[in-house]
Amino acid sequence: MLWFTKLEQKYGKYAIPNLTFYLIICYAIGYLLQLASLYNPSMSSLMNYMTLDIYAILHGQIWRLFTWLLIPPGGFDLFTLVMLYCYFSIGTLLERTWGTFRYNVFMFMGFIFTVIGAVILYLFIWIFGQSFGAGILEGAELLKTVSAGYSPMFSTYYISMSIFLAFAMTFPDSQMLFMFVIPIKAKVLGIFYVAIMAYTIFSAFAANVFYGIVTATVILFSLFNVLVFFIVTRKSFRTPTQIKRQREFQKRAMRPKNITRHKCAICGRTEESDPDETFRFCSKCDGNYEYCSKHIYTHTHVKNEG
């Protein structure tokens, strides 16, 4: 879209290159803190001060607006290393395909929507939480406890998932190895993961309505950037196949019309009029004179006088 292109022209110089690399660095720091907490219990308390807890943010802990990006998406093992490499690869590929600015917009939309989702969930607890927590907690204590309880759910897990879903939408026919063994197309794997998340939300509602609302808010807002980005840029977004076709069309369009590379100096035949014809230059003529197979041996040699 024109406005998005103008936005890119104006602010594109501020885009952060290799943004996926910095996200992986956040993962690494989070996992180091997670491992350190196994040997030092005080580190667990430190990580509790990093979650996206809106109640705590409103009470002065502003750093939580950013430090939640250090909350790792799960436990650390060999599979985690493989997944981090996978996310780094597809994130870098998306940045090269879309451009640094558009990839930055996509990623920061994911960060912002996640924070918005946490705020909306906090407001929901503030307005309706009492009916869910009546007889257990009340007032500020309810807000503080519940907000701290769901805040770890806002992690980089769904940010990583948004990267994969964007990859599946951009390269739907690319083949990946599911469970490192089964070859499967990216679009099929994307549908599979969406189905898993839908089942997660359904199961949460089946267990408890309040927990279902929390789970749905966390998942949907964390992935909202995928939907919004592709809707906003749908007219200007091009898949790699479309980009290749456009480049080939431009090359053909820029090729000069009616200009040939070979032309017989006697009959005027060219490779355009006779694609199967063979053209040769005559070494005995003075100058660059080219002839077709019929006249290469029968023509009169051109000689410059003097």
Image (cartoon, grey):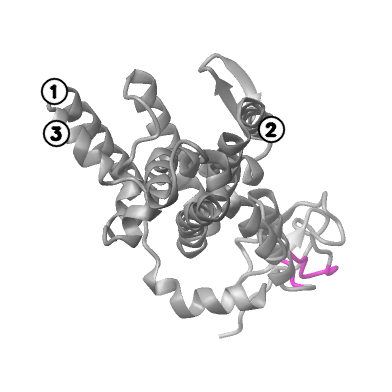
Element at label 1: helix
* Magenta span main SS: loop
Residue 106 or residue 45, whichever sits in front:
45
Quarter of the image with the C terminus in it: bottom right
Q: Quadrant of residue 66?
A: bottom left
- Say which residue label 3 marks: 42
3D distance between C-alphas at marks 1 and 2: 40 Å
**Label ID, residue 191:** 2
- On screen, residue 47 versus residue 227, left or right, reads left
Residue 260 or residue 34, whichever sits in front:
34
- Pointer 1 or 2: first along the chain: 1
Q: Would you say residue 81 sits in the magenta stretch?
A: no
- Pointer 2 or 3: first along the chain: 3
Q: Amino acid at mark 2?
A: Ile
Q: Quadrant of residue 44?
A: top left
Please give the name of the residue rendered at 76% of the width and 66% of the height, measured from the top-left corner.
263
- Say which residue label 1 marks: 39
Instruction: Estimate how packed mark 3 is, as few (under 14), some (14 to 19) or many (20 or more) residues with alpha carbons within 10 Å.
Output: few
Q: Position of residue 233 (x, y in %)?
A: 65, 63
Please give the name of the residue rendered at 50% of the width and 40% of the height, measured from the top-left corner.
158
Q: Position of residue 228 (x, y in %)?
A: 64, 58
Residue 95 or residue 131, whichever sits in front:
131
> Decide: marks 2, 3 in contact (CB < 8 A)?
no
> Decide: marks 1, 2 in contact (CB < 8 A)?
no
Magenta stretch? 259-268
Q: Amino acid at mark 1?
A: Tyr
Quarter of the image with the N terminus in it: bottom right
